[in-house]
Amino acid sequence: MLPGASLLLLSAALWGLSEGCWGTPGCRVVDMSHSLDTRSQKFPIMPDFHLTLLTRGIQDGGYWTEYYKFDTPEHISTHMDAPSHFAQEGWKLNEIPIERFMGPGVVIDIRAKAARNPDYRLGIVDLRTWEKRYGKIPDGAIVFLWSGWDVRYPNTTLFFNTNPSDASFHFPGFHPAAMSWLVNKRNISMIGVDTPSVDYGPSTTFETHQVMCKANIMGLEMVNNLGLIPASGAHITALPIKLLNGSGGLTRVVATFFQEKNCAY
């Protein structure tokens, strides 16, 4: 058997194992979500999050109980953009096939480029560079842009990298050409970013969103802990709230992988 074929078979075997490694020695589980609270980040046009206590304490029957209600916009904290967010005929949140919520993780490190230029957009060159090192982006992949922006969360000024006096935003995102390349050349399920949006901060037309959503690809925004998962080889599960007719919703994102795999770079 050729060495390359052996490597492909080994990679496939490891991928199959990583999908179901919960409880297996050496399996690591990483929470890639921010908590939802009054400091949760969202675009300024979105309403604030509110949590209201309904009851908390010892009840007449002598037992303890507590419960709350909350009021929140769809697109806040770690969340998923459904295709209907920017495509009239795109899937709504409850219409997305369940198998599209999980897949192999691809983490593309643009931290150095983002440090030099906060308006950097991940391009086709970045995708090809990753593939030269790790192989072709697998079918059903969830492709993450790792800019290191999660350390700025939940400080609004730092996270949106904005000057409050001019309300300008400056943070990295996917270039629409790279999004088109992923749509036309690869077979992915989602993209994800640790920034406020899959489009870069200065965008006014949200071209990446448009390309993504028209292709029925989902977007994960405000993802956390990308530095704790490997560049290749993790299994990602991203389960949003099943909101009827939702254009997006709060999402718990989890990565599982074997401990011997190095985290992303």
Image: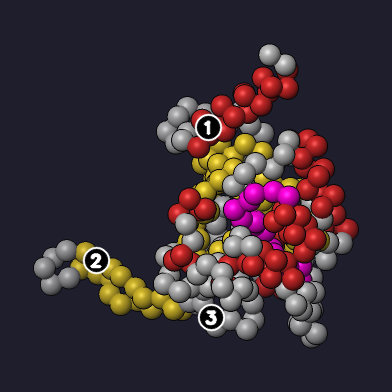
Does residue 44 appear anywhere in the picture? Answer: yes
**Distance between the Cα atoms at labels 1 and 3?**
41 Å
Q: Please give the residue where the numbered disc 2 appears in the rendered image.
A: 65
The quarter of the displayed image where residue 167 is located: bottom right
Tell me whether the residue at label 1 lies in contact with that at label 3, contact meaning CB atoms closer than 8 angstroms.
no
The residue that mark 3 highlights is 48
Q: Nearer the viewer, residue 133 or 6?
A: 6
Please, what secondary structure does the residue beneath circle 1 have?
A: helix
**Labels 1 and 2: the sequence-earlier one:** 1
Task: Describe the element under mark 3 as helix, strand or loop.
Answer: loop
Q: Which residue is mark 1?
A: 16
Q: Amino acid at mark 1?
A: Gly
Cα–Cα gap, marks 2 and 3: 27 Å
Asked if the residue under mark 3 is in contact with the one under mark 2, i.e. CB atoms within 8 Å, the reply is no
- Give coordinates of residue 25: x percent, y percent: 47, 27
Q: Report the span colored magenta.
A: 185-201
The answer to whether residue 225 is visible is no
Which residue is at the far top? 1
Q: Residue at 64% of width from left, 67% of height from top?
A: 214
In the image, is 95 to the left or to the right of 9? left
Query: Which is closer to the viewer, label 1 or label 3?
Result: 1
Left or right of 23 on screen, residue 112: right
Residue beneath the point at 52% across and 48% down: 102
Q: Amino acid at mark 2?
A: Thr
